[in-house]
Image (tube, coloured by chain):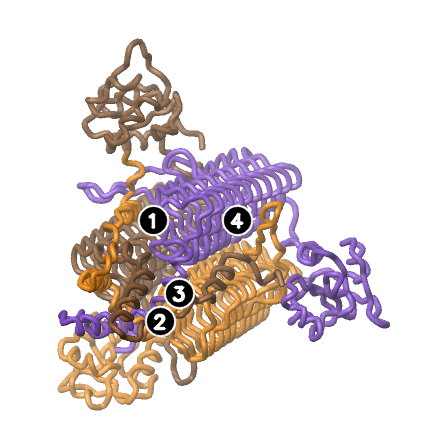
Chain colours: A orange, B purple, C brown
Amino acid sequence: MATPTYKLSEIAEKLGVKLVFKDDAEDIVITGINTLEEAGPTELSFLANPKYAAQLASTKAGAVIVRPEHEGDVVRALVTENPYPMFAQALTLFTQPQGSFSGISHLACVSPEAQLGEGCTVYPFTYIAPRAVLGKGCTIFPGCYIGEDCELGDGCVLYPRVVLMAGTKVGDFCVFQPGAVIGAEGFGFARTGEGIKKVPQIGRVVMGEHVEVGANAAIDRAALSTTVVGDGTCIDNLVQIGHNVRIGKDCLIVSQVGISGSTHVGDNVTMAGQAGVAGHLHIGNNSTIGPQAGVAKDIAEGQVVGGSPTVDYNTYLRNATLMPKLPELFKRVARIEKELGHKPITVSKTDRSLVTLWNRWLSMMHLKK
Amino acid sequence: MATPTYKLSEIAEKLGVKLVFKDDAEDIVITGINTLEEAGPTELSFLANPKYAAQLASTKAGAVIVRPEHEGDVVRALVTENPYPMFAQALTLFTQPQGSFSGISHLACVSPEAQLGEGCTVYPFTYIAPRAVLGKGCTIFPGCYIGEDCELGDGCVLYPRVVLMAGTKVGDFCVFQPGAVIGAEGFGFARTGEGIKKVPQIGRVVMGEHVEVGANAAIDRAALSTTVVGDGTCIDNLVQIGHNVRIGKDCLIVSQVGISGSTHVGDNVTMAGQAGVAGHLHIGNNSTIGPQAGVAKDIAEGQVVGGSPTVDYNTYLRNATLMPKLPELFKRVARIEKELGHKPITVSKTDRSLVTLWNRWLSMMHLKK
Amino acid sequence: MATPTYKLSEIAEKLGVKLVFKDDAEDIVITGINTLEEAGPTELSFLANPKYAAQLASTKAGAVIVRPEHEGDVVRALVTENPYPMFAQALTLFTQPQGSFSGISHLACVSPEAQLGEGCTVYPFTYIAPRAVLGKGCTIFPGCYIGEDCELGDGCVLYPRVVLMAGTKVGDFCVFQPGAVIGAEGFGFARTGEGIKKVPQIGRVVMGEHVEVGANAAIDRAALSTTVVGDGTCIDNLVQIGHNVRIGKDCLIVSQVGISGSTHVGDNVTMAGQAGVAGHLHIGNNSTIGPQAGVAKDIAEGQVVGGSPTVDYNTYLRNATLMPKLPELFKRVARIEKELGHKPITVSKTDRSLVTLWNRWLSMMHLKK
């Protein structure tokens, strides 16, 4: 994507930071931002972590955002007490919105009964159903579906192929990455004497402001009442949120996490990638759930857990350290038992069916017969 | 979504249950159904589990479906021996189909060589290829793709952006949540002397009746022959079904499960969320696979397993209980060895690289340097 | 899908292999290819693995690709030293491209500023943005989105509903299964004093030649610079690739794997299903990561690992064998301690909350109260 360029002096002015030239270095045109390792002579970089100060000597960056003590270490320095926020601010100068279309495409299908706020953009091939209400300045990319009675706040962005099923309510400035599905039927099935019975899912999804939803993520509508996602919560790609889940504010839900039905998650919770949470649990505020963790019980406020099923953080780390020693432990106990005249514990040879598991997962054997 | 309303007396009549008013309570208009905790004065609720009988005193519900012994405990009671099925039936009164469009949109692209049964609805921006055959009363939402020679039974519903690749066969009354992809190419790649060789995937997917497929789920077509999903099987969001998998009837496959190629799954099997099953296995009828389980061997009929790789249910639970004690076990064995004059088992300090794992998963460090 | 048919003699000629008839068997018409168990009298099968030679007696296949020593074991034999590659070659005779449309649909929205190479096919309802450049002979199925400044090589296939966000670069002959999303915003969020701060994602995705991407998979664009996928790498369904990840050549990334931001993966790496890799790691060439593995540290060239967190392959297998014996080990150590007059190790009863986990995951309890 063609990104804008700026004179370095212009950037310094926009950020309101001091610009320091070494020797006879001159003002240059900056074409982008990059890491110290990857930056080229027309790129701006930054040093936020003193640990990487050594890279200042080797970087090819045309200019670097640094703290005062480093202003002499680079050819061109933008000097500030807090390089990281300044870097993030500089990034916004080089950020361009996706998409160059504006207005309401005549190739879109917008119900006459739908209401669009001022300054909305609707791309071709998008379907907006009767009684849907969009706030001001929303951008709806191609292939989106906005069902009956949906309500969107101001400034929402739906990237291509986002689906909001009927009745979904979304606050201001929410962003949906491509392929996200909000408000599909929850997995409401009960085994009965006469096979599986489908339980109608008559609820909806309600989201706060500044919520972000990742690519191909799924948030199911409630069986009854609402599935809720609080203000500022960020949900990564391929995450599954079950029906009637309630998530608080400012949570980070990393990719491929699954949260089962009716679990309530507090504020400022972090869930690492591929973690799974059972249904009907309470996850306390400010708690942290580790990668691939399997949460089976309520998590207290501020608790940090890992493993499947989860244990506290320190036990998780300790067990991870001990597991490689487990074979030795078994041998040693057997030796002790022998010495004490007990019949020693015996363990069968390593289960070769596990090797099969590997072959089966790792190779495409099944066509090779 | 605007849901219908009914007089309570009307609901009692429709369900064929006795309506009992306490004191001078009168008939009211019911606007929806909700749980005992969440129901408001115009909502109907239910008590299926006696354990929650105490909530009858505090509920604000306008009326409650209860067993005879509780008919006096609420202002307005719908009295039945089996509250839960009656609740599910009541729900259907408040369930509305998604979408208000009907007919064949002139903004859809339907091949003249495709055959659509009576009463089908095809929304805008849907593509139906030559020789596709749809039964009666199918509803195809916007952005769907139905490939060449697909066959759909009667009453199928494809929510927005569902893809059925060429040759997919689907029985009556199947439901596909948004973004489901049926019949994509299986992962058929073999490492050879000359790098990776792609193995053409010439099979298809065949599904029975009343099959449900979740949002953004993927069911691959067979390399040869067919990938099969049996009648009444329900597949949740983001599930992966590999090529040549055969699944029986009335299975529940919960979100984010993955089933590798050529595995055969029996009838009435339940797989909990995020479980993974290796390829070429047989999973017996009525078996249960726990959350995040990793299945490496065949599972016998009725077996219940958990863990990765799986062990039987009781061992899984027992080990989960023992794991937090593992550090103590190591210490104690070391103490015994010391006492017996053996060189005691030693374990390195907790591996700090694991802390790094956490930081790496949990924080967005990499932009902070 | 209507597949072509060939006379067996015709197939023998096309493959350049010897055709041997047993007794008075005659040439027949072959309608497809199948396994020895499933093949019918008009289908061709193959024996690649001597282990299955017994099936030659029972197969109903009309003809079989076999090694010379088996040419007398079947009615009609195609004889070759290497049956498997010959089978794969035969498959290509029966493979048909998906889709029967060709040309640029007037129902597609192609920017006049986009450049399409000779012989491209663009289906209805696809959006191609300004400055997108497609090579020769690309096929873009319905509902795709190709953003500004994307560059595609020759012969790329985008199945329905594939999204390439602005600036994505793709080499020749890449294949994208339905619903794949390339170049969505990376998960760039940092917790700050004033809540979560979004870090703009200004990079892009660059892919080599012959890359395959699975259905509903997601590959995020870089925060800075590029996310890279090397030549010949195959990515399965529902895989998540984070921002700034760099993957080498000829890797196989199986379904539901997740790779966190800024991790670098070498060449010829295999990752089995549902494995997760933390961020900022280096995964060496020719290494293998097992199913559901959780990778927390760098992996050396050629290393094979399993478990979460990972241990080396043999330890993984050994521990998997020992885990079912863990309860007995605890009992035996307690017995030893008793005998030595120590206060024996005690473990609480099995934690019933875990049973709750099961019920919660496995049943739809929450509507049953």
Regarding residue A119, the answer to whether it shows in the image is no
Query: Callout 4: helix, strand or loop?
Result: strand
Give the crowd class for mark 2: few <14, some 14-19, many >=20 residues within 10 Å.
few
CA gap, disc 3 and disc 2: 20 Å
Q: Earlier in the sequence, mark 1 or mark 4?
A: 4
Relative side of C60 to A339, left or right = right
CA gap, disc 4 and disc 2: 43 Å
Chain where mark 4 sits: B
Circles 1 and 4: CB atoms closer than 8 Å: no
Chain where mark 1 sits: B
Give residue B296's mark. Answer: 1
Q: Tell me the residue that label 4 is attached to.
A: B234
Regarding residue B255, the answer to whether it shows in the image is yes
Same subunit: marks 3 and 1: no
Chain where mark 2 sits: C
Q: Quadrant of residue C346?
A: bottom left
Could you say where residue C345 lies in the image, as x and y percent from the top left? 32, 72
Q: Tell me the residue that label 3 is attached to.
A: A309
Give the crowd class for mark 1: few <14, some 14-19, many >=20 residues within 10 Å.
many
Same subunit: marks 1 and 4: yes
Give residue C341's mark. Answer: none
Query: Callout 2: helix, strand or loop?
Result: loop
Q: Label 1 is placed on what type of residue? A: Ala
User: Is A238 placed above or below B226 here?
Assistant: below
Q: Quadrant of residue B194?
A: top left
Residue placed furthest toward the top: C24
CA gap, disc 1 and disc 4: 23 Å
